[in-house]
Image (cartoon, grey):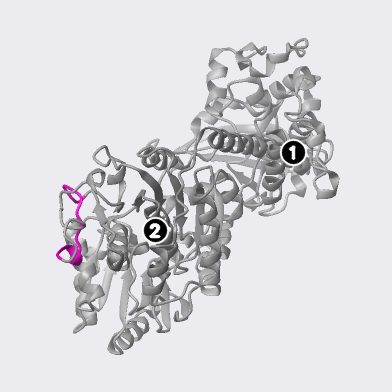
Amino acid sequence: MSAAPSQPPASALARSVTSLFGVGPERAALLGHLGVHTIEDLLLHRPHRYEDRQNLLKIGELQLREPASTHGTIVALGTKWYRHHSKSIFEIILEDGTGRLHCRWWNLPYMEKYFSKGNEVLVFGKPLLLKPRTIDHPETEVLEGGEENFIHLNRITPIYPLTEGLGQRWLRALIWHTLQAFEAKIQDPWPPELMVPPASGLALPSRSQAIRHTHFPEKSDQIEPARKRLALDEFVELQNQIQARRKNFELKAQGLACGGDNRLIKPFLKYLEFKLTPSQTKVLREIRNDMSSPHPMRRLLQGDVGSGKTVVAACTALMALESGFNVALMAPTEILAEQHFSTFSNWFKPLEIAVMLRTGGQKSPETRREAAEDTPGKYSSGMQSPSSAVHPIITIGTHALIHSGFNPEKLGLVIIDEQHRFGVIQREQLLRKGYYPHLLVMTATPIPRTLGLTLYGDLDVSVIDQLPPGRGQVRTFVRTADRLPKVWEFLRSKLSEGRQAYVVYPHVEENGQLGIKAVTGEFENLQRLLAPFRVGILHGRLRPQEKEQVMTQFRAQKLQVLLATSIIEVGVDVANASVMLIENAEQFGLAQLHQLRGRIGRGAHESFCILVGGAKTKAAQQRLRALEETTDGFRIAEADLKLRGPGELLGQQQSGMPRFRFGDLVNDLTLINEARQIAKGII
């Protein structure tokens, strides 16, 4: 590669990589596969590991199954074919005077075009055999003579993610020369006085130093501070966007006066059969302050399963209703919407407040109230639309609330339950049904603090950290499949005592996965196994009326066992159900298992959650053991984040979570907090 180009103009980092020497359209397209389009992208292309090439091992020093780097000269190479050319093995043999090393690639015959006899090759891998020394599918780099070897050898050498057609050596040299030319143009993105003080334990390099140390560190202890500095830049950029969006919102949005006057909340609390916990009262105080402020409320309510978020939502709704505004509550499933409709109807019946239900399974909204005859005009018209209601009402529904048919007048409050099931866009669609209504989003899936500060950074956060009194203890046990006979015996004993149980399987129907159970395939088996106790079945493919019928029978104890998929994760509240059996438990996420477990322990009886599975990996075993050890949802959420990572935890990218090159949402809480402070200073 030729010498580096002359100093670029100030805007050079935003230029295309095609402006670099040696990068034509073909190579630019290959770099594009790696997310590298501009010079800045190239300088931020992070190595996925490093090799210490200051002390390469001799071939004769390689140890069995210990990863190491070595190099030698190719003395032989070739491809051997098996079974009528259906299988192949390509092999090179290296020699360095201390021994020979066989490097093999199975079913990759095209590898032959990359090597020639006499090439000096650097190899990284883990020997599988010592007689002869053999590594399968190693990482390799053909070493070429010349002055550029100082980039690749006798140093801590970066190893980059590649795509087919790009060589490690070529990319490393490109980054080296680009850095030489453009390092002077790399600037810190915020004023130096806002930089984190050393007292915080984060004495970090400048951005230009961090980029150099990322690619070509002189010492290994320069790598992590460089990563942290570049991660901090990413977090500051995100927090800037979050805080600027919040500030702009507050400048243009006028809050609705929804603090209420207590004329509905006081009798409501008096009718309740329980007292609010101090934690619930504290949260309601925060919400009332928001609802009375000149800016619309944007608040996230976190609370573990069974902590009493629904009654807080009811009180919040009453504040808006007292103030003359309508309320919309959106839930992710019809089962949860039905549950809320039933609960709010019972609670609000003495207050003569209309509660409407709107789901995809209905042609029109309904107000199914026993009180219809007692209070004509308030609940009677099944075709009544929210916009025609004389008195403020609450409409509970699913995604159907987003659709064009729902157009409430004077929408003062939007409540979204199980927020993680909805995307930011869906949330905004519902908010646009009114003129900057207040927003309360709730989740029973505790959010790790790192995710909370990034994913929900534009929301104020309230936490209900106490469970209501009178709840039975929930004990969790992990069992292997060979213990199932005893598990069924235990379950039958609890049914005989008058309790009810849930049995959960991962799938609706069998899909060919060996040993993975499905509700439709096991229904008849369970009926025989648990006779004379009655078993009901519930899954997402049933029609809404069928789901409602099953749940009604289970609540009325006409069914003793509910066989279901994870559809019961939210929205099912049956105090008499005290046993939860989950088979193939390793197929579920940790937070999901915790949610399922939250369906029991809702009455005064001691409850039992039994996780049956064949967790084969260490991570899967750790996941199940974490549930056995604690019922604290926040500890479980942190464990889930560490075990699965944010990508798998968040699922579909509807959240708007950015892709971080350097930030680590598992371990960078301190950096995220620092970024919030820096962003405040910038704003």
What residue is pinned by disc 1? 229
Q: What type is the residue that disc 1 sits on?
A: Arg
Element on which disc 1 rests: helix
Confirm whether residue 178 shows in the render. Answer: yes
Q: Distance between the residues labelled 2 and 1?
A: 47 Å
What residue is pinned by disc 2? 318
Compared across the picture, whether 473 is left or right of 13 comes to: left
363 within the magenta span: yes
Give the class, few, some or many, for how many residues have Cα within 10 Å of label 2's Cα (few <14, many ≥20): many
Q: What type is the residue that disc 2 sits on?
A: Leu
The stretch in magenta equals: 361-373
Q: Where is residue 493 in the image (x, y as percent from the top left)?
A: 32, 88
Against 648, residue 600 (above or below) is below
Discs 2/1, front: 2
Which quarter of the rendering shows the C terminus? top right
- Sequence-earlier tag: 2 or 1: 1
Q: Quadrant of residue 240?
A: top right
Q: Which of 665 and 300 is in front in this view?
A: 300
Q: Where is residue 59 in the image (x, y as percent from the top left)?
A: 74, 44
Question: How many marks do you count on the picture?
Answer: 2
| Residue at image coords 51%, 56% | 288
Compared across the picture, whether 26 is left or right of 343 comes to: right
Q: Where is residue 571 in the image (x, y as percent from the top left)?
A: 34, 63
Give the class, few, some or many, for how many residues have Cα within 10 Å of label 1's Cα (few <14, many ≥20): many
